[in-house]
Amino acid sequence: MKQGFFITGTDTGVGKTAATVALMTYFKRQEQTVVGMKPIASGCENIDGVLKNEDALLLQQHASMPLSYQKINSYSFLEPVSPHLAVDKEVIRLDKIIQDADFLSTQADILLVEGVGGWLVPLNNQGDTVETLATVLDLPVILVVGIRLGCINHAHLSYRAIQASGVNCAGWLAMCLEPEMLKIRENIATIKKTIDSPLLGVLPYSKVLDFELLANNIFFD
Ligand SMILES: Nc1ncnc2c1ncn2[C@@H]1O[C@H](COP(=O)(O)OP(=O)(O)OP(=O)(O)O)[C@@H](O)[C@H]1O
Ligand SMILES: [Mg+2]
């Protein structure tokens, strides 16, 4: 059975990748081997004829072992748009992602899968969303809350949607994105009251992302 987590967020650009790499760092410190996967990435660069995405490359770089890029990023699209709009030639099929995830999970103790955007982002025109993907992958979910203005509402809405999906929410991470934000602690305390799952860490603002520092602030029971 796969061991790992599905990492979702309150929105795009809230720190899912930063949190995933911090979690990889955390698990490696616990003497566990890890792989990270970004199955669907829109916003890619053509590198020697292969579309590659910054997030997926970072996850590849932080894995415990060398892995083929194509397994880490099952679907890559050039334009940074919602996946279902990026798909002109290739339709996203969840069974392909499941196959890649199953393969990766045989390579390491822990598999971390970064979603795309937030929980209800459409993946294709057949009704599949990030929610569907997390459900079929059957991994507990970690919600990354980007701490910025509006985060209380986004966190509550996302958590309610995750709960309604019936998947197991292992916890949430508060990602401090803005050093100048007012009342950061109070915002986090308010969110804590609306989310029943444990707060796994308050990851500090880190101007030049320091994954060791972020990992220092992750705590599982
Ligand atoms: N703790 C932090 N301190 C400072 N900046 C951060 C922190 N975490 C994330 N960021 C910055 O916020 C931006 C978004 O982070 P990240 O790419 O991890 O978000 P994401 O949710 O994975 O985005 P996407 O939806 O594009 O995958 C990046 O520029 C990143 O460097
Ligand atoms: Mg990302």
Image (spheres, grey):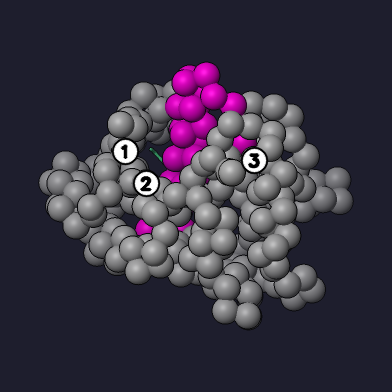
Q: Quadrant of residue 65?
A: top right
Q: Amino acid at mark 3?
A: Ser
Q: Residues within 10 Å of mark 2 (few under 14, many from 20)?
A: some
Kind of residue at badge 1: Leu
Few, some or many residues within 10 Å of mark 1 (<14, 14–19, 20+): some
Residue 128: percent from left, percent from top? 57, 73
Residue 113 has which mark?
Answer: none
Q: Residue furthest front?
A: 1
Q: Is residue 57 left or right of residue 183?
A: right
Q: Are marks 1 and 2 in contact (CB under 8 Å)?
A: yes
Q: Decide whether residue 25 is among the magenta residues.
A: yes
Classify mark 3: residues with Cα within 10 Å, few (<14), some (14-19) or many (20+). Answer: many
| Residue 22 in picture, x, y percent from top left | 46, 33
Q: Position of residue 38 (x, y in %)?
A: 61, 49
Nearer to us in this view, 13 or 37: 37
Quadrant occupied by the N terminus: top right
Pointer 2: what residue?
170
Q: Mark on residue 105?
A: 3
Mark 3 CB in 8 Å range of ligand 2? no
Report if the beta carbon of the residue with label 1 is closer than 8 angstroms to ligand 1.
Answer: no
Residue receiving disc 1: 200
Secondary structure beneath disc 2? Answer: strand
Stretch in magenta: 10-35
| Residue name at image x 73 percent, y 72 percent | 91
Does dot 3 land on a helix, a strand or a loop? helix
Of callouts 3 and 1, the N-terminal one: 3
Amino acid of disc 2? Ala
Q: Earlier in the sequence, mark 1 or mark 2?
A: 2
Q: Residue at x 70, y 63 (%)?
A: 95
